[in-house]
Image (cartoon, rainbow, N blue to C red):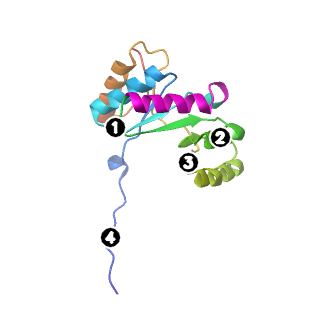
Amino acid sequence: MATLPRVRPRSPARAKVRHAVVITSLAQASAALAAAASAGVTLELWSAEGAAASAGAGWFKAVVEAARRAVPGVRFSAVLDCADMPGYALGAFRTGLEAVCFSGSAKVAAKLAQVAEVQGSRLLRRRPRRALDLAGSSDPYAACSDWLAGEQRRPSPTRARR
């Protein structure tokens, strides 16, 4: 019988850092992707909390697709926050979004996870601990570039000031 090689679990220090940026517009999304391209990192674009109810899945998908066309070749994912509203999560899956965040009950989340799997989407249960929120930033590219440079040295929670 052949022996399998031992696999070492990744230590938290060596784990891949998730670079999450909260966007509320196409300009912010495009600036974040351009900064990620310059820094050579993969990015997660996040909607604002509960944005599925205010902006909608269609709007978020359109922004993500337009940003993808504006800054081609950047590796990123996009997550629409549906808060604790399962109907909005289902709508996001039907729209074809790749990922949604649902903070409602575990029982409902289990059902949504099954739908997500069938649709080829992901269901996340909580927002990232560290994320750059570009709301109110007058220069989202500079804010994102500065934050990504700092994130690669030492992660910390940040809100854009530029």
Q: Which amino acid does label 2 sit on?
A: Ala
Q: Can residue 1 be seen here?
A: yes
Image: magenta residue range:
53-70
Q: Where is residue 39 in the image (x, y as percent from the top left)?
A: 28, 32
Residue picked out by circle 2? 89
Q: How far apart are marks 1 and 3 (CA)?
A: 21 Å
Q: How crowded is mark 2: few (under 14 residues within 10 Å), some or many (20 or more)?
A: many
Q: Is mark 1 on a helix, strand or loop?
A: loop
Q: Is residue 115 above or below residue 133?
A: below
Q: Does the magenta stretch include residue 69?
A: yes
Instruction: Say which quarter of the image contains residue 19.
Output: top left
Q: Distance between the residues labelled 3 and 4?
A: 32 Å
Q: Residue at image x 35%, y 53%?
A: 11
Q: What residue type is labelled 1?
A: Gly
Q: Which amino acid does label 4 sit on?
A: Arg
Instruction: Say which quarter of the image contains residue 74.
Output: top left
Q: Distance between the residues labelled 2 and 1?
A: 28 Å
Residue picked out by circle 1? 73
Q: Where is residue 40 in the image (x, y as percent from the top left)?
A: 28, 36
- Going from the N terminus, do you reach mark 4 or mark 2 first? 4
Residue in the foreground of this view, choosing between 40 and 74: 74
Quadrant where the image shows the N terminus: bottom left
Residue picked out by circle 3? 121
Return the residue found at the far top: 138
Q: Position of residue 158 (x, y in %)?
A: 42, 25
